[in-house]
Image: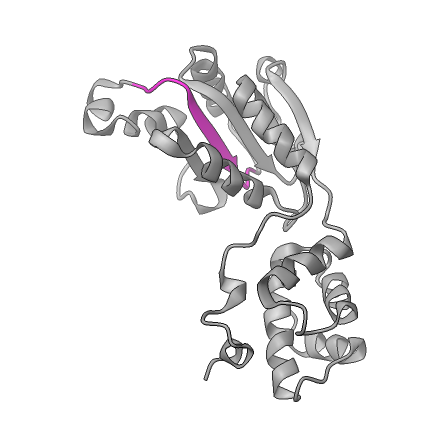
Amino acid sequence: MEWYEELDLDENPFSMDTKFFGNDDALKETFYAIISGNILVLEGAEGSGKTKILKEVIRKFGGYGRIAYLNAKEMSRELNVEEVLAKKNGFLGMLFKKYPKNMILLLDDVESLSPKNVERIKYFYDSNHLKAVIIATKSYEKIHFTESFTQRIRKVFALRPLSEFEAVQVVREKIGEQVLSDRVLKETYKLSGRNMQKFLKNCEHVCKVYLAQNKSLNEEDVKRVLERGAQ
């Protein structure tokens, strides 16, 4: 029996997509940037929710192939926006370099962009092939945008970590109200450095220990558990 089956759950709740909590202002700002056709930079530490916001964008605006999402960390070579857009029109698009109009470009986990790529993005934005561009990064300053591109950025929005209350609500939505106390979850969040990715991984580990110990676990136990097997 899997650990989550003991809680009468059919699948691992921590492998399922998380409902959106916190940073509502950032989400509204992102939606507005897309609707109004702007360039927006989302800046925040790892695990602050940047990718989650981009997933919400895909959910809302992803119809009719309008979205081009790229994770910079997962790319084996340098970004080529021209190639990305041409592929959206299939083989003929690649062959004749025909680009779609009004695309939404989402760039995730961006640490740097070459001046050439920045100018490519600017060109396709100015020529209406890109309606909006959302760039998610840990540090806006380290990307070193060109001056002409910087002038086109509507806003740099800094994401804040979720509050302890918001973080607890994320887990409650997954496992209900009866498993783990709020104090245990808050302690787990603090020990995870307020990084939501680490927090959810650590919560799964804590849940397994909680069940193995006959549903007995307090804050001090959490510290010992995570010191032995910290994520």
- What residue is drawn where x is 40% and y is 26%? 81
| Image x and y of residue 213, in percent | 66, 88
Q: Residue 131 or 231: which is nearer the viewer?
A: 131
Location of residue 67 by image quarter: top left
- Colour scheme of this structure image? one colour
| Image x and y of residue 55, in percent | 50, 42
- In the image, residue 100 sits, relative to residue 17, either above or below, namely above
Res. 75 in view: yes
- In the image, residue 97 sits, relative to residue 205, either above or below, namely above
Residue 108 colored in magenta in the image: yes
- What residue is drawn where x is 50% and y is 22%? 132
- In the image, residue 222 sits, relative to residue 50, either above or below, namely below
- What residue is drawn where x is 76% and y is 75%? 223
- What residue is drawn where x is 46% and y is 69%? 11
- Which image quarter is the C terminus in? bottom right
Q: Residue 86 or 145: which is nearer the viewer?
A: 86
| Image x and y of residue 184, in percent | 75, 71
Res. 231 in view: no
Q: Which residue is the extreme one toward the top?
A: 127
- Which image quarter is the N terminus in? bottom left
**How many labels, in total?**
0
| Image x and y of residue 152, in percent | 59, 15
Q: Which residues are magenta?
A: 99-110
Residue 202 in the figure: left or right of residue 81: right
Residue 109 colored in magenta in the image: yes
